[in-house]
Amino acid sequence: MRHLMSPMDFSTEELDQLLNLANDIEKNPSKYAHACAGKKLATCFYEPSTRTRLSFEAAMLNLGGSVLGFSSADSSSASKGESVSDTIRVISCYADICAMRHPKEGAPLVASLHSRIPVINAGDGGHQHPTQTLTDLLTVHSLKGRLSDLTIGLCGDLKFGRTVHSLINALIRYPGIRFVLISPEELKVPSYIREEVLEKNQIPYEEIIRLEDAMEKLDILYTTRVQRERFFNEEDYVRMKDFYILDKAKMELAPKDMLVLHPLPRVNEISVEIDDDPRAVYFKQAQYGVYVRMALILTLLEIEV
Ligand code: NCD
């Protein structure tokens, strides 16, 4: 039985297969409409979510399966003090596969150690968010036609942004990847990622503060929200929250074929005035999230269509 805790749990060949499957699902949805008939997905979300939880549910429903779950810690027995390991033992009796989001780093991993069903990490604290990365890879692969030879600007909260951490881990395995890390000093990529991931693998990267200085060299701009819930005090958040606002003027500095991605939710970091720019693909990205989660559910349940 396989779980998904980090994008590194899949080899690049397996990732390719998963993305190909997602592309086929996009083209031929009816072929997959009953693939998970009789199967149940549990969504155990101890932290807020719109896209991740609902796209998992939509994915399972599109596959002809059913869904059950909870969407906040308050509405589960966690509020009575139940441990994640006890909860997953019980969920294993009710469902065939589980997507879990938790504010504590490593909680889905603990769950996987006690589970009889595949567990998917749907975001653990400021650590990883592998299914967002699968979504991001599918978006870039589908719209750019490649995952290699790309200059990727990662902008915003690179310290607490788990989507950024997972994406860096996944992308370094493709040739010709370079990163421009754009953040205020306080929100730089954690040193364990800089040292253990980027430097160890000799991945070219630069760290800069001004978004304007990066725009012209980027193939992809991956923007993120300042992660308010992970700050120790509100003043720091208020000081940081509007540090970057991507607007029309900045988009004029960018190549004509640069893509703007964002895992969403957006707060202020992308002005709505660029939503109609063909380079702004964050809503398409959310749609790709459904196809890739369908592919993931089929893969982990070992269902072949
Ligand atoms: C992200 C997350 O939860 O980490 N959202 C998502 O799943 N699409 C990004 C965020 O909350 O900023």
Image: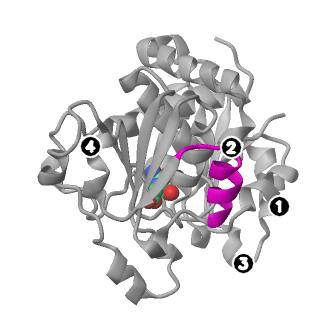
Q: Amino acid at mark 1?
A: Ser
Question: For mark 1, does the 10 Å Cα neighbourhood hold few (<14), some (14 to 19), or many (20 or more) residues?
Answer: some
Q: Is tag 1's residue or tag 4's residue first in the polypeptide sequence?
A: 1
The residue at 38%/89% (across/down) is 235
Q: Label the magenta part by its dominant secondary structure.
A: helix
Front disc: 3 or 2: 2
Q: Earlier in the sequence, mark 1 or mark 2?
A: 1
Task: Name the residue that disc number 3 marks.
Answer: 80
Residue, x 85% and y 43% (percent of image)?
116
Residue 152 as seen in the image, left or right of residue 74:
left
Secondary structure of the residue carrying tag 3 is helix
Determine which residue is flagged by label 1: 85
Nearer to me, 136 or 207: 207
Q: Which residue is mark 2?
A: 201
Instruction: Tell me if residue 201 is in the magenta stretch.
Output: yes
Separation (CA) of disc 1 from disc 3: 14 Å
Residue 241: where, in percent of width, then height? Answer: 33, 73
Q: Nearer the viewer, mark 4 or mark 3?
A: 4
Q: Are marks 1 and 2 in contact (CB under 8 Å)?
A: no
